[in-house]
Amino acid sequence: MALENFLAETDRCSQCSYCKWIPFDHIKSWRFAKNCPSVTYNNFNSYSARGRYAVTRSLLKGQSGYTDTVEHIVFSCMACGSCDVSCKVCRYNLEPLDMVRELKFKMVEDGHGIEAHKKMISVLVKEHNTMMQPKSKRGEWADNLDVPRVSSEKFEVLFHAGCRFSYDKVLQNSARSAVTMLKNAGVNIGIMGEREMCCGGRAYSMGYRDELDRLAKSNINACSKAGIRTIVASCADCYHAFKRLYPQFGSQVEVLHTTEFIHRLIKEEKLKFRTGMPITVTYHDPCHLGRQGEPYVPWQGVEKKIKKQIIVYEPRRPRYNGAWGVYDQPREILKAIPGVQLVEMQRIREYSWCCGAGGGVREAYPEYSNWTAVERIEEAKSTGAEAIISACPWCERNFMDAVSGMGDSMKVYDIIDLARKAV
Amino acid sequence: MTFNKDIYRALEDIVGSANISDDPAVLDSYIYSLAHTAIHIGPFYNTFTPQGAAVLMPGNTEEVQAIVKLCNKYKIKYKASSTFWSAQGYPSEDNTIQLDMRRMDRILEIDEKNMFAVIEPGVIAATLQAEAMQVGLNTHIPGSGCSCSVLASATSYLGSGPGNLYGGWYYENLLGVEWVIPTGEIFKTGSLGSGCGWFCGEGPGPSMKGVFRGFLGAKGSMGVFTKCAIKLFAWPGPKSLPVKGIVPAYRTTLPDNFKAYTVAFPSWKAWADAAYSIWDAGIGYLAHRQFNMFGRDLKYAMVKILTDPTKTLGDLEEILEDPEVQKVTEESKRDFQIILVGMTKRDIEWQEKAFDEILNKTGGWKVEAMNDPDVHDWALLYLLRLGHKNLNLVFGGGYDGAFGFLLPADYGASHAEEAGEFKKEWEKRGAMVEAGGDCMMGPIGGQGGGGTCLWENFTCFDSHDKESTEGTLEFFDACTKLSKEKGWVGAGMEKWNSAARGSDGRTTPKEERDRIHRSAPQPSVYRYQRKIKEVFNPNDCGDEYFETLDD
């Protein structure tokens, strides 16, 4: 796709502002009714999907250039996809998330990426990670962990740790727990260790399409050589990259998030929770596991009209609107742990509020990123929960930083942490 | 930016640098295409409202007041808008300051005992309803849907919707108002003006509704409304709507005192008789001919799509081939939706009995396919929350209404078939969606308690397609011509707002405005409004949506 392909959508977006709210049917209060961190924080219409359609139209028609304001409008988008869900409650022929991604690609390809991202990308090119760390240290998270590495043994199931788990020393115990649990359940699992490379998903959401291309091809090649049939990821961003983006490059491996795998093991009675944990928790749906976690469906086709002016697609185009993301498995895992009481926030599942770490916003605009996380912590607190649970290290890191800044007592856990303690 | 830097700085001092912008990229998102839903002037292909000089987001009444005073000092036009649902909320002329009222979005009070809420401009109907339900109350929601500003609907436009029947439209629900008049002074109206609180719009204290609204609302051209109280009414349901289902097929299951029906009739006369009987009996919580907006031939197939998350518009043709769908489509030609809500068990039993008697008397029937539990619960949620109103634009991104009027049920019904047949012929030409001609929709009870219906024949087109947009415009002109030839009361809805904004998206030239106003049935209305404007808006800092005519 190219940005030009979205010109029709810029005319067909009716500027209704549904993209600023969670689906209206689900609104339960004034306080937690908004969905888009970008427009909620910056307020001007330009910072919503409808505004970004307007910016796209202006750029395509040569009415505006690449000003600092345009850059800020475009790169303030977390690419969380909440606008996409709300838009598609009523519309079948608009793709706001794809549009804003394409807008980022165009900006980057025309040399208008932002400095914070450029620095990260330059390290990513050399060191294959988004954490500004040397690649030689990538496998250290698994030191002393009894798990085969790709160079030494053959295995069918690959645990991909991802950049955040690989280098964030506070969080990486969750990755170790995931591997241990799966291994103890009899899964023939291994890791890439220091050979693991970034999935490219975060670079993609910042506008660096070529980086995804390069990393996807390398990772697909590495998996193919190693005979990998299944990839398991504990990071929602990695999961999304492998599940939704890699098939476009020919990947055919099965992709599971750790929560899906553990849920499967529970159903097959290969995993049982025995230890009680008396705690009230709330669950945060990561954007890339939930609304963006739908399976990829290949499609190539064209727009056509039926009934004279109804826009449809030939052949039938897959519809990604968050309906089929991974929502139930994490909840069922939590409910299966004795003593855990799950209380829900008001914005959940496909209309969940973003953690604030997505789209390169954490790297470029830390204050705004933190504000977004604080909003979520406030929502979690309103449920009476003692802990906020997620299934993505980027969410967890942003929440931990926010809680620390707030001086709050809310605990932040990866779902694996709870599951591991309960086994 | 065409005004000087000193003025910009003065405005910046009022709202703070984070809440003002004259950056073209920001201003780009404050123009509106007249090819979407221009609200009865177009559509016009590739035509936009003019870009403002700056956009400001005031945070409180004092800031609004300071902005308005500054605008008066420098004779700068300003236009306030809250939720920007259509072209009406955007500037009509260059160098206008756009006020985006988004930051003033607080629900200041819900007075449970006296059943009203005090709100700021940015409060939308969905959030007010959600908060009101917490205390056993509900709000009316305008036909444009729950995404729209309650205050704007009540103070500045019609605010009509499906809930008119029981709750009255927003204009009728407007109580005390805090109004920054066009010169910048604060005017508190109704009981608020005499220091008695918000509870009444008409007094004790100055009754100003007619003055600041004028004919059909001033639409942001007569100062800025910064707070208002809005009447709430009884909600005998749960504190929040229990919503289930997979997006977008959300639905709610409510207790037995809630019933949603689609009913149909053997003739338009029977349809109108049923409406009169409903009003006479005083039953019903809301009533609307809603799903017919998709068109007589498409409505049930669209219900099938919207209640099944695996379906898309791409399935429409196949669904239309289904004999069962064809049967339901045929039996629900002359239909409407109604929700009965009982305040007690006896109440709902009585309403059901009365409603059945009305159907029996008029020969009407309940469309059984719409009583399927999932469809019933979907329709119930749809109508109570009105959170899917942007389905108006589902087909191609553009729609507007034709053949509209606010008139007694039998009068409207007598035109519906002929208007539908006329549209059906035009649909064959290809510019608009071929939907079966009759796309008439609107409230059964155009105002509080009933007595009238509000009709609009929805016409959907592709706003990206020049031929589709221009063909639709041609059709609307033909609608006006036909209505005039037939002598239909209310003719000309297609161009209602063309006295204020022209085909270039800008203020209609004075000669044309005067011509339109002079030919109106009651031109004196506009002469009175001119006198009001001279007093309240001497520096002419608004646009022409507050319509005037010289002597």
Image: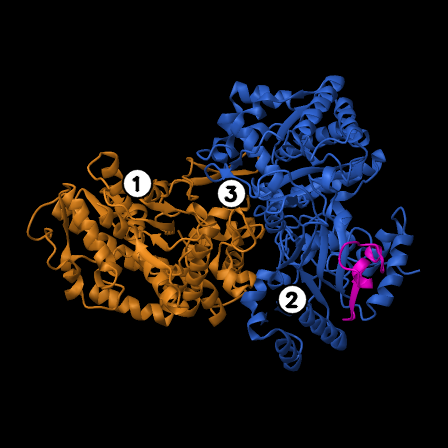
Which residue lies at the image location 65% right of the left edge and 48% below the top edge? Answer: B37
Q: Nearer the viewer, mark 2 or mark 3?
A: 3
Mark nearer the N terminus (3 vs 1):
3
Which of the pair A92/A187 is nearer the observer? A187
Judging from the image, mark 2 belongs to the subunit labelled B
Judging from the image, mark 3 belongs to the subunit labelled A
Give the blue chain's letter: B
Residue extending furthest toward the left: A152
Disc 3 marks a residue whose amino acid type is Val
What SS does tag 3 mark? Answer: loop
B179 w.r.t. A83: above or below: below
Q: Nearer the viewer, mark 3 or mark 1?
A: 1
Q: In screen coordinates, is A110 left or right of B351? A: left
Judging from the image, mark 1 belongs to the subunit labelled A
Chief secondary structure of the magenta portion: loop
Using the image, tell me which numbered label, if any, was put on residue B52: 2
